[in-house]
Image (cartoon, grey):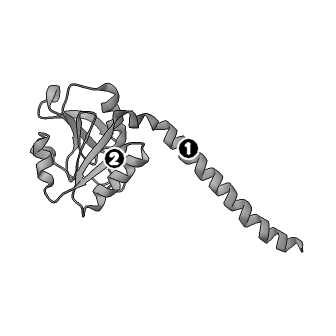
Amino acid sequence: MKPIKTLFAVVPAAALSLGITTLAAVNGVHAESHADMAEHGTMHVTKSPTCGCCGAWVELAREEGYEVEVTNTGAITLAKQEHDVPGTLWACHTAVIDGYVVEGHVPFEAIAKLLKERPAIDGIAVAGMPAGSPGMGNDPAARYDVIAFGGEAGEGEVFFRAGS
């Protein structure tokens, strides 16, 4: 075989092999760094069946290592009321994990902090749908507050500042 034909035959196969190896290494590190998230049990997410940003947040939660169970409903406000989420903190989906409520597009660093520190609160929330939050563009530089509510936090206090 001529050298140029050999080059065209070998280079694509080598590039593919290197790409698959690199992808596996990156995913392996990501999964190992978040393996302890499954120790907190299943995250139950209640959302609208047609909400794309909520679906994106759920997929990001799975990528972070959370085991996620989804309930799609047209009556999402019932989940917020059932978990005593203050009306000023409502967002598009409501999750529950390890006894805590997680309302809206909360960044996963805030959830990890919540589960590690285990404060005497009912939950954390990101009101509305801030641009750049997980599921809403997922921009690590986006700035917004995560608010704790219930228990020692009362109606709400800053728990985590995203983007700082």
Residue linked to disc 2: 68
Q: Which mark is residue 28?
A: 1
Q: Nearer the viewer, mark 1 or mark 2?
A: 2
Query: Where residue 145 appears, x then y in whole percent?
Result: 25, 41
Q: Are marks 1 and 2 in contact (CB under 8 Å)?
A: no
Mark 2 residue element = strand
Residue found 55% across the figure and 41% down from its top? 29
Q: Is residue 76 something that shows in the picture?
A: yes
Q: How many marks?
A: 2
Mark 1 residue element = helix
Point out the image quarter for the N terminus: bottom right
In the displayed structure, 82 sits above or below 150; it is below
In the displayed structure, 91 sits above or below 124; it is below
Q: Which mark is residue 147?
A: none
Residues at marks 1 and 2, CA–CA distance in whole angstroms: 20 Å
Precedes in sequence: disc 1 or disc 2: 1
